[in-house]
Image (spheres, rainbow, N blue to C red):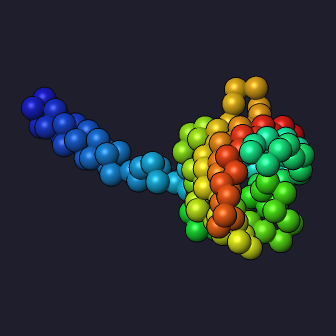
Amino acid sequence: MNSKYFFTFLLISSFIFMLDGCQKDNNNDPALSTADRDKFLGTWITQSNGTSGPLSFTMTISSGSSSPAQIKITNFDQEGTGSYVFGDVSGNYVSLSQSIIASDTITGSGSYNSNGTLTFNYTIRDGQTVDTRTATAHK
């Protein structure tokens, strides 16, 4: 009799462990992958300096729509409120997609710092000159 109950117990336990192993993993949950991007979002007061001199401007970073890692930056390097630069966030880093605004081609990268600021290193090419710039932004 004991072996009959033991076998039943073993069978039920095995079935329960199998069901637990079939639960869906949340590794691809979009809410988890947007956490890196979220710290970049908002309105940032920015100072940049480069070959063409210093600039002060306000830029706005919002969520991009093509992926959970994409950001959309409005008025990057004082290019205008109707202009956008896109980037892809990974951890504390952002890679700026090559963007063409009017005759300017912008490429670069940036990072979110432990003190809550952003820093960017980028170039702007207008077809004749190359402006190498650095920028620091805070909320």
Residue nearer the viewer, 11 or 64: 64
The C terminus lies in which quarter of the figure?
Answer: top right
Residue 106 point in image, percent of width and height: 65, 59
User: In the shown orientation, is residue 4 left or right of residue 56?
Assistant: left
Q: Residue at x 66, y 54 (%)?
A: 130
Q: In this view, does 22 lie above or below 50?
A: below
Residue drawn 72% across the image and 40% down it: 134
Judge whether 83 appears above or below 109 on screen: below
Residue 87 position by quadrant: bottom right
Residue at the (86%, 66%) spot, across then down: 81
Q: Is residue 72 above or below residue 55?
A: below
- From the top left corner, tell me how far across and down residue 84 is, in percent: 74, 66
Which residue sits at x=45%, y=48%?
27
Asked whether residue 36 appears in the rendered view, the answer is no
Toward the viewer: 32 or 127? 127
Q: Identify which residue, 108 or 112, lies in the foreground.
A: 108
Left or right: where does residue 62 sit relative to residue 81? left
Residue 136, visible in the rendered structure: yes
Name the residue at the front extreme. 128
The N terminus is located in which quarter? Answer: top left
Residue 125: quarter of image: bottom right
* For residue 130, side relative to residue 10 (left or right): right
Please tell me how many numbered marks the rendered image carries. Answer: 0
Q: Position of residue 70 (x, y in %)?
A: 61, 58
Which residue appears farthest toward the top when viewing the image? 115
Q: 98 left or right of 104?
A: left
